[in-house]
Image (cartoon, rainbow, N blue to C red):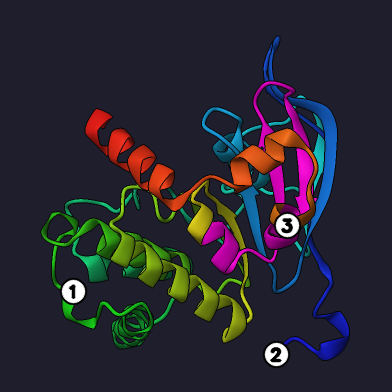
Amino acid sequence: MTSSQDTRAVVIDVKNLTMGWGPNDILQDHASFQVMRGDVFVILGGSGCGKSTLLRHMIGLEEPLAGEITIAGLGKPRLDAGRPAFGVMFQGGALFGSLTVGENVALPIEQWTGLPRDAVTAIVRAKLRLVGLSAAEDKLPAEISGGMRKRAAIARAMALEPDLIFLDEPSAGLDPVSAVELDDLILILSRVLGITLVVVTHDLSSIFKIGGTCVMLDRASKSIIARGNPIALRDTSTDPRVVAFLHRSVDSLDQDRDARETIA
């Protein structure tokens, strides 16, 4: 259990980050920020601004052009450095289609621990119960809804009891009810279990509901143009780019979501 003295300790420290590929910089302003323990830290911005790319840098799938990223107790993040120190839910869930939901959640436990089968089964069922998927343990990913696949992916991300979880566009492609349910689950993970979450999203309803701290990326300037609490930024920012993004209407958001689903 984390003591009250260190509840605001730095979990992720990003210093002077430049990211991109060769001359095609996506973020070029030597960005620096910190993610604090217990926060729901949101990376937001419009399409193509580099949100998911920043997350890939933070989990070690991409190397920065300059600067460094360190995770408390881990140093430089690497997904291939042994037992994962954090969980990741990739956009779309990335479940193995030939495995049942329960087998997907069991996979990291079987790979990184020597626990007996009964213990693995007990952990899997506890994680699925937490995300409301007890009845889906023996179903294949193709047999469940998109929202259920996202929750199953979160259960898998929690399988090794990490203190830090990354979520890439958790509400993308979901109907409004499923998106709200997923937001509620994120808040439970944060407020009840004390997990630190880094969430990539452009969904305003999610941003305002779950976000504790955020950074906003801008495609044109290739920089972070805002940081802080998203509701405070919505109410006080005078940057026209931030105002335009954070004051979009719910109707326009629904239209944008429908358009993306039609294109997909």
Could you tell me which residue is drawn at 28 percent across and 57 percent down? Answer: 175
Compute the Cα span from label 1 to label 3: 42 Å
Tell me the tag on residue 235: 3
Q: Secondary structure at mark 1?
A: helix
Q: Is residue 23 left or right of residue 129?
A: right
Looking at this view, is 41 or 138 the one in front? 41
Residue 43 visible in the snapshot: yes
Which label's residue is closer to the chain start, 3 or 2?
A: 2
Q: Is residue 87 left or right of residue 41?
A: left
Amino acid type, residue under disc 1 in the picture = Ala
Residue 25 versus residue 47 in the image, above or below: above
- Compared across the picture, whether 4 is left or right of 142 comes to right
**Residue sticking out furthest to the top:** 23
Tag 3, which secondary structure? helix
Find disc 2 in the rendering and name its residue: 1
Q: Which residue is more in the foreground, 25 or 204? A: 204
Name the residue: 32% across, 48% down.
173
Whole-percent x, y for residue 229 in the image: 74, 61
Q: Residue at x 28, y 61 (%)?
A: 147
Queried whether the magenta region covers residue 92, the answer comes back as no
Q: In the figure, is residue 113 to the left or right of 221? A: left
Location of mark 1 (residue): 136
Mark pair 2, 1: CA separation: 31 Å
Task: Kindly report which numbered mark, 3 or 2, lies closer to the viewer in this rendering.
Answer: 3
Q: Position of residue 231 (x, y in %)?
A: 68, 61
Label 2 crowd (10 A; few <14 / some 14-19 / many >=20): few
Q: Which residues are magenta?
A: 206-233
As shown in the figure, which amino acid type bears the numbered disc 2? Answer: Met
Specify the label residue 5 is tagged with.
none
Indicate the amino acid at tag 3: Asp
Q: Earlier in the sequence, mark 1 or mark 3?
A: 1
